[in-house]
Image: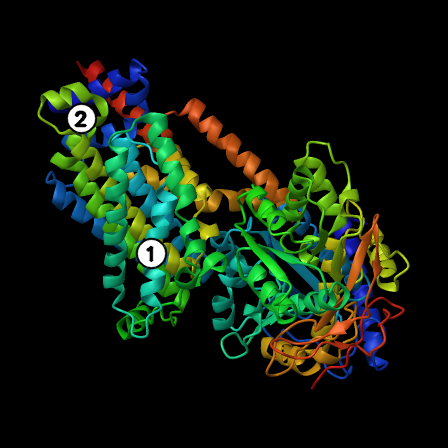
């Protein structure tokens, strides 16, 4: 019992002092605590455990996509690209303590790379295109990261904000290649034969372009989360946490703060690049108006509402981002509001929900649930003596 | 009697009237279907007694002022048609959703409209970058994509986008008509161009240059979103331009006017149709100047173009019809030019649905616009350019001068086409709306 008690009570104690940075990132800390203990049927080995979860999620995703209609499949694509970008951002903000308001612009890099490469006469295989998008965005991320590593808090926010505002403007400047205001249309890559066959055996239906894109998006999401989860549980993840929580202690332990901050930014940018690539496929267009500051802020909203530092939290936040405004709008319309009023009201209610979550669950939805679980576990084990 | 059963009785009554009229060989309630057949659910989005049409508009965000009024105008006209029996006895269900002028949202809501709401057709989707995100999807799904609310030339592409149709005159022919007017009436003017940095500005400038190449002394471009236009306006002033052509959206009409006022620059202004709505520009002027300029009086004497009737001509029979329709719809607010635009599009849509026949498929609707669209009489001053090879909208417009809250026409209706087509006076009569206010087109098949 003792191995269970130690991490649980320390996390609860951290929250009890209401030390803001610790409790705000409770979602990140708690999950690592869970990995070391708790009654779980999952294997102890991190890689094995993550592989098992990956397989389960993949099966779950196929069941979800095949048991719902095409309209829902289409929405899943949107959840996927938000979640991929939010996953990268939550690593940066939740684990490493850096804020970025520029992830929308990094997504634009991935999106435009994909659009340009897919437009070729003989387009490269999709995997290669995605890797190129990831690599190029990671490169941009490295450049930004070097600048970012020297900045803190509001200064970092300001610098990345400039990126978010400035970068989409390049599309207007290089109008000939990047399509200007009206953007580049992205053609759906051809469905391979095996995909059509598999879907036919699975559900009997004939797959459409929408379904093919939904599967690509979900596959990208799962692979990204698998890789990020492993990274977060590794020595790298622990180092990032150390940099976030105690700079002096980390430096005394021989950690090069700047270098580790840049790595976090690069990994995070790579995820944003893939998210942009998926966005290009899902939206079928890359245009500057799609990558405004609003996109960057939405990503930040998703990870804060879900729980900073938790991939599951980022996913929950992204689901809310896609489905909540829609549910609110439908609710408004069923109350006999006209579409314009319902659309306006949905933003107000969305904002109110955000404020309420921040007030009553500062660790985000996932973080708060985990904290509550840990507290009750700690109480139980304390009672048992 | 409960509310729903009253509604049911109303529906049955309306359907009875419509079918009776249809049996009498077509009346003024749109029953032009021949009468012998019965209504069937002939395609996605059509049932025996409903037909579902969808659209996307910016209802929130920067593009919402003005544009968010368009769907309320469409709603009012469809309500009017429905109250008078609908189209071939079918009630039009009109679903529009907010995309906040963001292409990501547009593709999301159009997915929803097509895959979940299962609309028969999309109508009047607004904006160039926004609508550009969904044309491939709509065409690959075979959904009719009628009357896009943008003057871009992207919508006239029969090969690549066989179901997409433009509606308003494109920016290039508008540029040509403006260019010729200026060349003829201001032959000594030094012309400056004030352009939005996208295809709107480019196409407009390309059209104007066909007639003004020698007169243009400066060409300044702004990036939408950047609200400081002082560099552009001072450059026009420095180049000595005494006539400025603006291909810009309404907010930049207001900004350019205020900036010119600050700089003491007073050329003859000529704004394209998109940027010249006096009511909206007036309210924007008041807001941007924090009350220092309270109305559109700055726009007095400004030149612009028109292709459908505007609300400052209350004697126009179309505006009288729209006024009646708007009052009957009971929605809040006044009839505005944006609502009149929506009603004009809705009128064209009803023509298209009637021409598509009693039990149309999506292909029938596209074929109907291609075959009959060029002959439709409606609110537009000039005819459409629709055919099997062309999906371009109205072929012309007239030049007018803003005077107070009204405007005076300076030219007859001028019609032309893209490229080096000649500009000619339109010799047709201005159409008046039918007595009932609802078109009565014969099915094409």
Disc 2 marks which residue? A242
Disc 1 marks which residue? A277
Give the alpha-carbon distance from disc 2 to disc 1, as whole Å: 32 Å
Q: Quadrant of residue A279?
A: bottom left
Label 2 element class: helix
Please give left or right for residue B266 compared with residue B43 in the image.
Answer: right
Q: Quadrant of residue B392?
A: bottom right
Q: Residue B21 or B421: which is nearer the viewer?
A: B421
What quarter of the picture does the C terminus of chain A occupy? Answer: top left
**Residue B347 in sight from this viewpoint:** yes
Please give left or right for residue A196 compared with residue A172 in the image.
Answer: left
Outermost residue, bottom direction? B445
- Classed neighbour count for the residue bearing mark 1: other residues with Cα under 10 Å, few (<14), some (14–19), many (≥20): many
Q: Considering only vertical position in the picture, is B172 above or below B276?
A: below
Which subunit holds the residue at mark 2?
A: A
Q: Residue at 21% x, 41% y: name it.
A: A229
Q: Considering only vertical position in the picture, is B421 above or below A347?
A: below
Q: Residue B139 or A140: which is nearer the viewer?
A: A140
Q: Considering only vertical position in the picture, is B265 above or below A94?
A: below
């Amino acid at each position: 019992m003792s191995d269970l008690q130690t991490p649980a009570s320390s996390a609860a104690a951290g929250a009890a002092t209401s030390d803001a940075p610790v409790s705000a990132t409770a979602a990140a800390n708690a999950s690592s605590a869970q990995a070391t203990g708790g009654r779980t049927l999952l294997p102890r080995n991190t890689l094995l455990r993550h592989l098992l979860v990956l397989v389960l999620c993949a099966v779950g995703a196929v069941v979800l996509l095949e048991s719902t209609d095409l309209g829902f499949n289409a929405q899943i694509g949107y959840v996927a690209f938000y979640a991929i970008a939010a996953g990268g951002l939550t690593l940066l903000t939740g684990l490493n303590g850096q804020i970025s308001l520029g992830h929308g612009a990094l997504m634009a890099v991935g999106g435009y790379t994909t659009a340009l490469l897919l437009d070729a006469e003989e387009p490269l295989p999709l995997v290669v295109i995605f890797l190129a998008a990831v690599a190029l965005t990671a490169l941009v991320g490295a450049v930004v990261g070097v600048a970012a590593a020297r900045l803190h808090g509001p200064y970092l926010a300001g610098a990345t904000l400039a990126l978010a505002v400035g970068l989409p403007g390049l599309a207007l400047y290089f109008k000939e290649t990047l399509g200007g205001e009206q953007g580049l249309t992205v053609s759906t890559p051809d469905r391979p034969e095996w995909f059509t066959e598999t879907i036919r055996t699975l559900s009997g239906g004939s797959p459409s372009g929408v379904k093919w894109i939904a599967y690509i998006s979900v596959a990208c999401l799962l692979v990204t989360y698998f890789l990020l989860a492993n990274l977060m549980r590794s020595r790298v993840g622990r180092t990032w946490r150390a940099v976030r929580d105690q700079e002096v202690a980390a430096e005394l332990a021989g950690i090069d703060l700047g270098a580790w901050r840049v790595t976090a930014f690069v990994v995070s940018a790579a995820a944003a690049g893939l998210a942009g690539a998926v966005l290009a496929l899902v939206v079928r267009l890359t245009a500057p108006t799609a990558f405004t500051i609003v996109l960057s802020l939405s990503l930040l909203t998703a990870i804060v509402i879900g729980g900073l530092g938790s991939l599951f939290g980022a996913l929950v936040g992204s689901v809310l981002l896609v489905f909540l405004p829609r549910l609110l709008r439908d609710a408004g319309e069923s109350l006999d509001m006209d579409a314009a009023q319902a659309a306006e009201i949905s933003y107000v209610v969305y904002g109110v929900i955000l404020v309420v979550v921040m007030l009553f669950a500062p660790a985000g939805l996932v973080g708060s649930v985990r904290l509550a679980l840990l507290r009750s576990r700690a109480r139980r084990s304390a009672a048992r003596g | 009697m409960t509310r729903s059963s009253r509604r049911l009785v109303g529906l049955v009554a309306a359907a009875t009237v419509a079918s009776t009229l249809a049996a009498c060989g077509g009346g003024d309630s749109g029953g032009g279907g021949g009468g012998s057949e019965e209504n069937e659910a002939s395609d996605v989005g059509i049932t025996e007694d409903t037909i579902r049409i969808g659209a996307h508009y910016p209802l929130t965000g920067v593009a919402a002022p003005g544009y968010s009024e368009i769907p309320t105008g469409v709603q009012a006209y469809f309500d009017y048609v429905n109250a008078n029996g609908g189209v071939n006895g079918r009630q039009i269900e009109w679903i529009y959703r907010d995309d906040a002028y963001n292409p990501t949202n547009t593709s999301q809501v159009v997915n929803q409209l097509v895959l979940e709401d299962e609309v028969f057709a999309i109508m009047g989707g607004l904006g160039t970058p926004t609508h550009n995100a969904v044309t491939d999807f709509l065409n690959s799904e075979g959904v009719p994509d009628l009357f896009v609310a943008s003057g871009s030339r992207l919508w006239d592409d029969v090969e690549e986008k066989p179901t997409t149709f433009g509606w308003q005159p494109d920016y290039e022919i508008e540029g040509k008509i403006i260019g010729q007017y200026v060349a003829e009436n201001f032959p000594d003017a030094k012309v400056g161009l004030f352009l939005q940095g996208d295809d709107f500005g480019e196409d407009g400038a390309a059209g104007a240059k066909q007639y003004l190449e020698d007169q243009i002394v400066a060409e300044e471009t702004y990036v939408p979103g950047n609200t400081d236009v002082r560099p552009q306006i001072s450059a026009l002033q420095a180049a000595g331009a005494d006539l400025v052509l603006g291909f810009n959206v309404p907010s930049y009409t207001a900004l350019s006017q205020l900036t010119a006022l600050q700089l003491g620059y007073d050329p003859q202004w000529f704004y394209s149709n998109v940027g010249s709505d006096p009511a909206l520009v007036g309210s924007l002027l008041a807001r941007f100047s924090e009350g220092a300029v309270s109305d559109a009086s700055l726009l007095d004497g400004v030149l612009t173009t028109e292709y459908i009737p505007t609300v400052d001509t209350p004697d126009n029979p179309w505006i009288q019809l729209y006024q009646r329709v708007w009052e009957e719809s009971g929605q809040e607010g006044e009839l505005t030019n944006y609502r009149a635009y929506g009603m004009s599009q809705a009128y064209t849509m009803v023509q298209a649905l009637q021409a598509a026949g009693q039990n149309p498929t999506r292909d029938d609707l596209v074929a109907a616009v291609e075959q009959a669209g060029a002959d439709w009489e409606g609110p537009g001053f000039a005819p459409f350019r629709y055919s099997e090879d062309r999906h371009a909208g109205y072929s012309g417009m007239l030049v007018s001068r803003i005077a107070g809250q009204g405007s005076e026409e300076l030219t007859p209706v001028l019609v032309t086409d893209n490229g080096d087509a000649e500009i000619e006076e339109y010799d047709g009569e201005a159409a008046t709306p039918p007595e009932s206010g609802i078109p009565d087109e014969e099915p094409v098949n």
